[in-house]
Every structure is written in C-alpha cells, then in structure tokens.
Image (tube, rainbow, N blue to C red):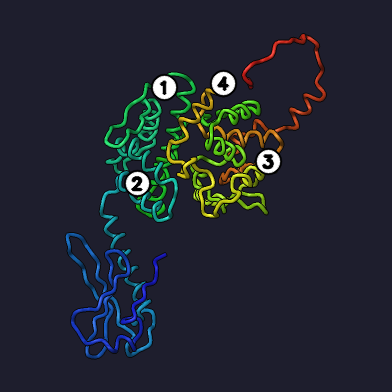
Amino acid sequence: MAKTVRERKLDSPTARAKLAASGKPYFRSIDPGLHLGYRKGIRGGKWVLRRYIGDERYSVETIATADDHSAADGLEILDFYQAQTKARELAAKVRGAAAKHEPLTVARAMDAYFERLEHEGSKSIVDAKNRAEMHILPALGDVLVVDLTRERIARWLKDMADRPRYVRGKAGKAARALPAPESDDERRRRRASANRTLTVLRAALNQAFRDGKVDSDVSWRAVKPFKEVESVRLRYFTQDEVRRLVNAAQGDFRDLVNGALFTGCRYGELAALRVHDFNPDAGTVFVAQSKSGKARHVVLTEEGQAFFRQIITGRADDELMLRHADGSAWGSSHQLRPMAEACKAANVAKAGFHIFRHTAASHLVMAGVPLNVVAHNLGHADVRMTTRHYAHLAPSYVAETIRKFAPTFGTVQPTKVVAIGGAQ
C-alpha cells in the first residue's frame, strides 16, 4: 500500500491560502516519477498530476478542483490526501494501458516477479534470480508468454535436467560445466533442481496471469514436474560419530559444532547469533535471521542450555555468540576447512557442515519427538518438508508391533566380529 505523503504548504485550505497565485504548480513528489501539484488561481486552485514518461520528459494534466472554497466531495472536489489517491489511480491506469500494448515476454514476466519479491523482502529472490539467469532467460527469455505451449515448457524442463550442471564462477570468471549426470543419484539431483527452476518460472507466469497480462495459464499448469526426485534419505551422524567429531574439532570450531548439534540451526543462522539471543529462563535461542525470513525460538535440551550458559558467561549482550578466537565473525566458507579436518581426524566420511542440522533433526525424531515440533525448531514453514526427510526415522506402530510379536527363527548365530567406524 502506498504511503500517504504530508506537505504543510499544501495539506489544508488555510496553508494554501498563504501561497501566491501562480501559473506554475507547487509540486510534491508522492511516488518515484510521480508528483502531485497545486496550481493556484485568483479564485481557487486545481490539483494537477505530473508523471515522468522517459527521456527527461513529463506529462502534466489537471485531475480535480482543490477544496479551497468548498468541502471535498471525493469526486470533483478533493482535499490533498484524496488528490494523492486519485493521482496514483490515474498513473496506474496509464501504466496498465501501456503494458497491454507491449508484448509480454518471459523476461518481462520475470522482471515483474522479481520486483514483487524485492518489495516483499523475500529471502528467495537470490536463488530465483540465479535460476532465471542460468536456465530460464537464455532459453525462454525472448519467447512471448502467449506462445508458450505445454510441449515447449516440457522440452525445456527435460533439456535442463539432461544438461551438465554449471557451477557459478568467482568474480570475473565464467561459469564452468561439470560432467553430465551419469549415476542414478546424479540424475535425481539434476531433476530435483530442474523442478525447483520450473517452480520459479511458474510463479512468475502465475503472477502475470493474476495481473491480467495473459489470458490463460493452461500451458504451464499442464506441465508435470519429475516425480520421486526429492525422496532421498539424508545422511546423519550417529551418536558415536558425533562424539568423535566434537573431540576432533579444534578451538572455536568445536563451539560452532556444538551450537549446530543443540539447535539444528543453519551455518548462517549460527554465525549471526548474539549473546542476548539465548534466553536462560525459557531455555531457548532466538533466531532472527533465517532462510525463510521468519524469526523463531529454538527450544534447547538441558545439555544444550548448559552449553550456551557456559559460552556466554561474562560476555556483553551484543557480542557475537559464536565467533573466531580473535573475536571476528564466522564468514562465508570459513567452516569448510575445519569441517574437513575434523572429519578426517574423527575417521568419518567427509561431509558438509549442513549435516549437523540433519543430525540434530534425525536424533530428535528417533527419540520420539513429534514431527511438527521438530519442524518448529528447524524453522520449516510447515511439517511437509520435515515429514519428507525424517518421517522414516520416527518410531512407528507398525514397526514396534512387528518387532514385539514376530517369531524368532534362530538362524543367525552369534559372532564376536564388531563393526569399526560407527557404521550405520
């Protein structure tokens, strides 16, 4: 909703009476490229609209009579605030009419979608823009939305999944292609990524349809995403592996690992925590910055509360809670090397730092914590993602009943051979 603008010289008949009569309006900016003006004559004034039309040119038109001598009626006679509303409405109609005469390409639909995401402060805009830049705009950017067919979008989706994966280059370097997917798991990951890019395209096209810029949404609604590509079992550390990793972690990285295990927070969330985010009375950690954009309170176990009490003792409220030994913040990629070193020293398979989030969630589920409670602690928007990744670990009535009543055949002989390395 547009913000109402205030201007002491114009906002009342008494204030405007002090102005000198002039053929040149007194203008006040109310939106980017949009001004509301008051042109004062000998017998009263008129409200005028000035709109920027490009190339350093403006369009000026009279929109109503000012309420200098008669009460505002909301139609022909307007006060300062009513005039603002009408000015915005007229400008919107002009923009809408102009848009109807311009061909709507996929690129223009994407631009409008990104504009809305920026206005809403959406955290997903970075990923959406990257997907558009890499996959949507090169293939479909110049295509008119009305020319999109189900077959064309489906072919684009398949081609995207079959192509090699590209890794974005560092500053000044071009993206590089990785080998084409060969294994079943690589193909699954490429299809899952293609599905997420299709979701971005659909969101932009749906917005264009809702805004009346296109008459039908049948073509993209009819495209089916790849099935059963998200049903992957996530890896997690066993309790034995956790103990070995914590023991192997060095210095300040050990605190970071413990923080991840006790909260299930993402690396970026942990790096942003301040001392005052821990509430010892409630036994929670407050996460203000999250991937979803929503803040949350993470409930801690007794062990987790004890850990956070230890690391904040004697420290100022606004200090970073988890930091390097020199007091500096954990930055982008700072966790990669110590994580690799800890895995090697602990003799566990190499993994990224994000596995601690999966480990925390997996052990909560296996302990019988309801999935909706785990979803809350993780900051998931709803229980669907939590169910997809962790439901197979939850104690179930079926499994418990089978293990309780099923017969024992006695065909497995005891052995003294013990697995090494904490195999799952």
Depth check, mark 4 against mark 2: the one in front is 4
The residue beneath circle 4 is: 347
Q: Are marks 2 and 3 in contact (CB under 8 Å)?
A: no
Disc on the earlier residue, 1 or 3 = 1
Instruction: Give the Cα distance between marks 1 and 3.
Output: 43 Å
Is residue 373 something one can see in this rendering? Answer: no
Q: Residues within 10 Å of mark 2 (few under 14, many from 20)?
A: many
**Which amino acid does the dot numbered 2 rest on?**
Met
| Residue 303 - label | 3
Residue under the image location 71 percent in, 37 percent down: 368
**Which amino acid does the dot numbered 1 rest on?**
Pro
Depth check, mark 4 against mark 1: the one in front is 4
Q: Quadrant of the N terminus?
A: bottom left
Residue 103: x percent and y percent? 27, 49
Residue under the image location 21 percent in, 87 percent down: 21
Instruction: Give the Cα distance between marks 2 and 3.
Output: 48 Å
| Residue 261 - label | none
